[in-house]
């Protein structure tokens, strides 16, 4: 898959252990596959964000996992139960992926697609307020 990469995101990923690099590359490919207009940036000094008319997701490597923060206002369906944290959170939720765990690419891609659709409809704040 070909897409425009932000070299700062490459720097973040390249500094990680190989297993975390692999997770980040897979997530990066999935979010870009959800929509070719997704852009990469760095926010909060070093954290990779993927945006399209609002935040879609962000990556944060922790000691024993990689967090994929989903900026969906809790709206995106999760029929396969891949969301691991933030249930009931009104701004976003998390998918934590540990070393050796397979990524459910279909489910995560579906969530990215739903977030992007919500962003294009004005964002989760507008959608949930009914305006």
Image (cartoon, rainbow, N blue to C red):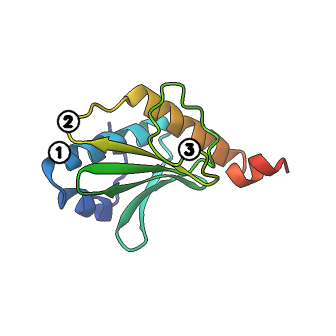
Q: Front-most of 95 and 12? A: 95
| Residue 96 x %, y % | 37, 45
Q: Outermost residue toward the right?
A: 131
> Callout 1: 10 Å neighbours few (<14), some, many (20+)?
few
Mark 3 vs mark 1: in front: 3
Q: Which residue is mark 2?
A: 100
SS class, disc 2: loop
- Residue 34 located left or right of residue 11: right
| Residue 64 in view in this figure | yes
> Callout 3: 10 Å neighbours few (<14), some, many (20+)?
few
Mark 1 vs mark 2: in front: 2
**Quadrant position of the N terminus in the picture:** top left
Which numbered tag is attached to residue 115?
none
| Residue 2 in view in this figure | no
Which residue shows up at 51% across the image and 39% down it? 112
- Residue 23 located left or right of residue 69: left
For the residues labelled 1 and 2, the Cα–Cα distance comes to: 8 Å
Which numbered tag is attached to residue 87?
3
Would you place residue 95 above or below residue 47 in this image? above
Which residue shows up at 15% across the image and 53% down it? 17
């Amino acid at each position: 898959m070909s897409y425009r990469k932000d070299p700062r995101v490459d720097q973040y990923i390249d500094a990680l252990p190989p297993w975390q690099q692999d997770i980040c590359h897979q997530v990066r490919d999935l979010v870009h596959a959800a929509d070719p207009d997704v852009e990469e940036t760095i926010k909060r000094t070093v954290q990779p964000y993927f945006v399209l008319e609002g935040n879609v997701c962000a990556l944060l490597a922790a000691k024993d996992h990689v967090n994929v923060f989903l900026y969906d206002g809790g709206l995106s369906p999760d029929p396969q139960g891949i969301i691991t944290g933030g249930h009931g959170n009104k701004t976003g939720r998390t998918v934590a992926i540990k070393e050796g765990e397979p990524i459910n690419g279909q489910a995560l891609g579906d969530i990215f697609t739903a977030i992007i659709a919500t962003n294009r409809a004005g964002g989760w704040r507008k959608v949930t307020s009914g305006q």
